[in-house]
Amino acid sequence: MSVDQSYQRPLLLGMVGGGEGAFIGAVHRIAARLDGEFELVAGALSSQPERAAASGAALGLAPERCYADWREMARVEAARPDGIELVAIVTPNHLHAPVARAFLEAGIDVLCDKPLAISVQEGRELAALAQARKRLLAVSYNYSAYPMLRHARELVRAGELGELRLIQVEYAQDWLALPVEKEGQKQASWRCDPALAGPAGALGDIGTHAYQLACFVSGLRAVAVCAELSSFVPGRRLDDNAQLMLRFAGGARGALWASQVASGCENALRLRIYGSKAGLEFEQEQPNRLRLTCLGGSSEWLSRGRVDSAAAIAATRLPPGHPEGYLEAFAQIYREAAEHIRARQQGRSPAPQSLALPQVGDGLAGLLFVDAALRSHRAGGIWSRL
Amino acid sequence: MSVDQSYQRPLLLGMVGGGEGAFIGAVHRIAARLDGEFELVAGALSSQPERAAASGAALGLAPERCYADWREMARVEAARPDGIELVAIVTPNHLHAPVARAFLEAGIDVLCDKPLAISVQEGRELAALAQARKRLLAVSYNYSAYPMLRHARELVRAGELGELRLIQVEYAQDWLALPVEKEGQKQASWRCDPALAGPAGALGDIGTHAYQLACFVSGLRAVAVCAELSSFVPGRRLDDNAQLMLRFAGGARGALWASQVASGCENALRLRIYGSKAGLEFEQEQPNRLRLTCLGGSSEWLSRGRVDSAAAIAATRLPPGHPEGYLEAFAQIYREAAEHIRARQQGRSPAPQSLALPQVGDGLAGLLFVDAALRSHRAGGIWSRL
Amino acid sequence: MSVDQSYQRPLLLGMVGGGEGAFIGAVHRIAARLDGEFELVAGALSSQPERAAASGAALGLAPERCYADWREMARVEAARPDGIELVAIVTPNHLHAPVARAFLEAGIDVLCDKPLAISVQEGRELAALAQARKRLLAVSYNYSAYPMLRHARELVRAGELGELRLIQVEYAQDWLALPVEKEGQKQASWRCDPALAGPAGALGDIGTHAYQLACFVSGLRAVAVCAELSSFVPGRRLDDNAQLMLRFAGGARGALWASQVASGCENALRLRIYGSKAGLEFEQEQPNRLRLTCLGGSSEWLSRGRVDSAAAIAATRLPPGHPEGYLEAFAQIYREAAEHIRARQQGRSPAPQSLALPQVGDGLAGLLFVDAALRSHRAGGIWSRL
Amino acid sequence: MSVDQSYQRPLLLGMVGGGEGAFIGAVHRIAARLDGEFELVAGALSSQPERAAASGAALGLAPERCYADWREMARVEAARPDGIELVAIVTPNHLHAPVARAFLEAGIDVLCDKPLAISVQEGRELAALAQARKRLLAVSYNYSAYPMLRHARELVRAGELGELRLIQVEYAQDWLALPVEKEGQKQASWRCDPALAGPAGALGDIGTHAYQLACFVSGLRAVAVCAELSSFVPGRRLDDNAQLMLRFAGGARGALWASQVASGCENALRLRIYGSKAGLEFEQEQPNRLRLTCLGGSSEWLSRGRVDSAAAIAATRLPPGHPEGYLEAFAQIYREAAEHIRARQQGRSPAPQSLALPQVGDGLAGLLFVDAALRSHRAGGIWSRL
């Protein structure tokens, strides 16, 4: 376990989006301070000046660092001697790319919510920009930071599963089973509006998480998908359910199901991978364990805190049986982003385990996945290449 | 519960297939006698005369009723005053239809293993024949006889789930993850041989179970499927993994996964159905419970013995907490077949709950499903209508 | 697996108790025929002649073998050339010993429900009688016949758990949480009446099952107990909840909880044993698995059908993932009783695995346990030696 | 949910104990900052000056606020205008009371690890002192801050369980199954040394947690206990396993098991309470759910985020399906301590939900429980009154 680290001053954090009433902004703030890695000092929490100021005040920001315009924030913060060292982008999807671009151009590292952008083109431009400016463009694929998924990846890499054959991944929720977007539910409103969310609904919002997890653990990328998107709630403009079949590089096959209308499901992200020797299963709602099933044998439940891979240990804070959860995994993203920033500041390479941090390449892979799925669906369900 | 019934003499049972070394034959025999409904008195347990005789002797059959030729058995038994009243067909798939035909033509009721036949054409002929001869042609879709699945169907019928939207069904095993068919494993050998198993591998062997379960509980039939079949084990001639997306009548969508190479999976048949109001989940490996999840609410585990539908009660023998299993569900098929036979003998209608017995219509639906899946796959994965 | 056996004619079975409305009688009848080992041919199903005759007729017994007096039944059946070869005693507790005595004295083997008797003295006399007459006196501690508990015992014997330290066993139900004995519930009425049930309520009815299981798997017997018995339901004359602490031979410690007023519990019999190297856990409601937890390591779920001990295999009928349950375990008791009887008939020793059959010694151990617990409780909760 | 709060400056925190290598000190530090309620500014992290200084530096403390003597720390911090507003005591047990006394006497609020002290006498003096000085003396019974246990308490209070009858609580670990205290394991060394840990081993270390949880949820206190303490590891001077039976005020009965030698158990704290109408079950290792079982009915799994009691909501940060864990519950203790301090600073009453914070009364109850258990055990296992 790695609870303590030798002291380093907290890095300075800014946030775009995440004003009052937002869910994910508050999550980012807890995650950023949980390990003492970041101190929030600036924000463009809302585009409405009054709301931006009020939201900032409620978080203890100095008034002059409560911006209503993120372009101004990028410019001003880049110029301050005590300017922010990382910006967290927690806006609706359509702003991810423009905001990320502005901060990267200002030389500021970025941690952006997924999806990275709303088009492959945007994603490619961001990738090029981050590389050109040598800045971090991390993507908050937080689920892949669970210690037991880090361990799962090591098991796959070590060949414990044999040759991979099957990847079944699903992400089921029920919070959009009714037309809540028409009832003023803020989270739903923008997610169901193509202008704000982009062209994909459940597929983009949670399907990309599922796809990233499958790729992260398996080490594989899909080469083709066959998709069936549905909008079950009358009047909904984006898909609220996505069924996909996948062909992975190397011959593995898989299925992905993402739904926001699966009545009774909370946040049921579940990954199963089967190889020629063994299988593994992970359920996000019980993240402290990983099931390993051996061909013809019994099943083993591996526990966080009782597995010995360096990858799992690096992401673990507590002994076995002391459950860690969503916030701890999210904080791991921040811990790894901090390590990248500090390493560059100190002129060294990031610690090996921090390389698991999802970055622009992962974000772009997600956009390619969504794009292929949309093409498949629009063509009536033919296999489409990524 | 319904452990006791007033005494009726056991019906006389014959069996085709199921000689020494067979698995499912022994299951049928336990199931047939568990409730005291049948007495095994004749068999064509093997096509090799010596083996037929030895297998019959080991089961206490009279020598003259140990047949090596099922055609002869049908003819002789039909002519005996104490001839069999039901024949159980537990041969490899390619014989299902010819054997069933022979016994139906002899006027003997039939309980046939699934798949009903190896072609839609065969299935249609059997359906016509059974109807013309007014004989029972039951199909051993045993899983649908679990009390909690009977209850699940009642919940759907009563509208507890609202309008059905999603049906996710899967059936994963690992016993064909290695090329055991080349090592003399009897069960594997015929299942991997197109001449004996028909044109579908995992799709036909277990995918049809999964499809039947989905239809049985939902009350829906698929109207189109999109299939991706794979043979992961080198040299295997039939699919050992099947991924499908399904469109159901009325607009529900679904996915079906059948695999015999999912390392570590035993007999993981799992059904999930989500409607606009609630969802339900059943896992065959823990058949005494059913999970009901309400939209936005908590999840309830319903227990066999503590649910009050007449359908569940009719299929239940023991109080809650006294687990029933696979054999009891299989015995329910025999109990219901017996009820059909006795009802006709007594000139009355079968008891309402016994109408849940899977019959030739269900078997034909399975053949249509397999046929559409094969067409889809062979065309490179396009949606094919049933 | 051992589904098939070479054919042997069914042994002839009689039953005392178990008339209409009885639960456990019907269970015994299914268990007796499940493997084809026994055929029920005689019964004293009720002490009321008309009811005895009607119950027998409903089971297909010949009228002359429907007895109202079990003493007559013992005498007559012993004299018949086709007399019963085993009697199953399924009466209320107070009759167990007298009935068993009558049949043993008539030279007929006995399978008796637990508790073996209602006093230690009765139990000792039965033990002496069975030994003197060289007859089987089996006790239906059916739970110990689950394959995974047979396997658990082998793990303990093989030293996989190290030196045993702790035994936690519990058996919780809720069916007596209300005063149902006053409302004509037949099962409850006699169990709550000291004249019929003996001096112990939940302690005797289910506590003895729990204690037997603990002893069976651990290979240990308690040397002292400290008991606290309670009657939570007003007016109830016997305990409906029993808490005990136990000291086992060799230094292991344990606790036993038996309750029939634990609201929401169905038949929650659960055994946990911890040694210096590993622990194991079994839950009767999910009997196809056994949890093995290693010191400092992860936990493994062993599956029925995937463990390789001869003891487990001998008690297993189906492949992994095809759940077996309560009736199959109960049938195993009958299968083993049959093996004992056939072995004596054939002048050979019973097959080694059939020696796991619970017999009079186990029944007597249960009576000693109850006796010590009652003494402890009556003395205000002091440690009492067995 | 209550992620955001309007901004208030972090309170100033000091810590006694918790230097390098300590586990619980790091937990406290994360918990203190998770919600932004506290900033660590001073510490007596070790009694060795060099180690104290180094540990403080690693945490970013100013050198002059790194104390080696907690008496000096109390005096100096009380005198500083920017002195600490709360001290967290995370030392071995024997120092809890003296340190708490010193800070209370200096007028500084205290959050002390359990057990509150090593004798009832010490506990009583602390209670009197805290009352006299009108200072907070909170005790880190962190488990009772899980949202679903807060909800469980509300269910009991609202009568959903009916009249309480049974309380089964257990806390099983395996980390002391080997004599690790002799191998330099720091956590084990002091816990197995009576001079540092006090007279109780597992009983005091984890049994008190279990007892507090039982009392917290049930609203009851034990009136008598009967205890059996064991030391299974050769040479161990304190108990590593404790079995107890309990009589609660009002007639409920219960059992408590605390073990640190249960091979394979991680941190298995589990509470079950049964009343005349329903039962509930909570397992700490899966803290986001609570099982509610109704008499004669099915069982319901209530989810954190989907229950509506104000008590649960106040302790919840994330939506359902986004697991919270040990650190979040621990942070809740800090959040509630902060609320108490701020309320006094602001001359108002603490928010109602913050009154669930465990305080000196709960700590004293734990000491009375340990004392009665030790008396019972030493007298050979007689019932002893609290």
Image (cartoon, coloured by chain):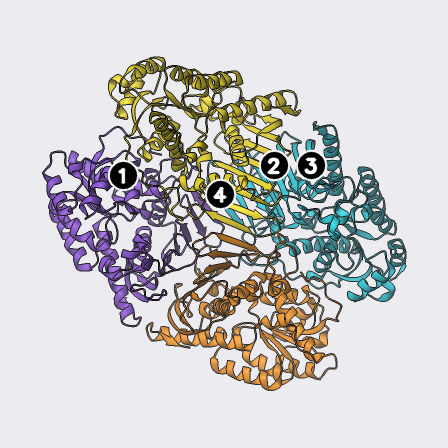
Chain colours: A cyan, B yellow, C purple, D orange
Same subunit: marks 3 and 4: yes
- Residue at the bottom extreme of this rendering: D132
> Is label 2 in contact with label 3 (beta carbons under 8 Å)?
no
Residue depicted at 47% across the width and 80% down the height: D120
Mark number, residue A299: 4
Q: Decide: marks 4, 1 in contact (CB < 8 A)?
A: no
Query: Quick check: B207 left or right of D334?
Result: left
Which-is-in-front pick, marks 3 and 4?
3
Residue most extreme to the front: B347
Residue tagged 1: C32
Q: Mark 4 lies on which chain?
A: A
Q: Mark 1 lies on which chain?
A: C
Q: Residue D21 at x, y = what percent?
A: 59, 65
Question: Which residue position holds label 3?
Answer: A230
Disc 1 crowd, CA 10 A, few/some/many (<14, 14-19, 20+)? many
Q: What residue type is labelled 2?
A: Ile
Q: Can residue B201 be seen in this view?
A: no
Crowding at label 2, few (<14), some or many (≥20) Cα neighbours within 10 Å? many
Residue name at image x 49 percent, y 50 percent = C298
Mark 4 residue element: strand
Q: Are marks 2 and 3 on the same chain?
A: yes
Q: Quadrant of the C terminus of chain D?
A: bottom left
Look at label 3 and name its amino acid. Answer: Ser
User: Closer to the N terminus: mark 4 or mark 2?
Assistant: 2
Q: How far apart are marks 2 and 1 (CA)?
A: 46 Å
Say what amino acid the circle numbered 4 marks.
Ser
The Cα–Cα distance between marks 3 and 1, rounded to whole angstroms, is: 54 Å
Query: What's the mark number on residue A167?
Result: 2
Nearer to us of marks 2 and 3 is: 3
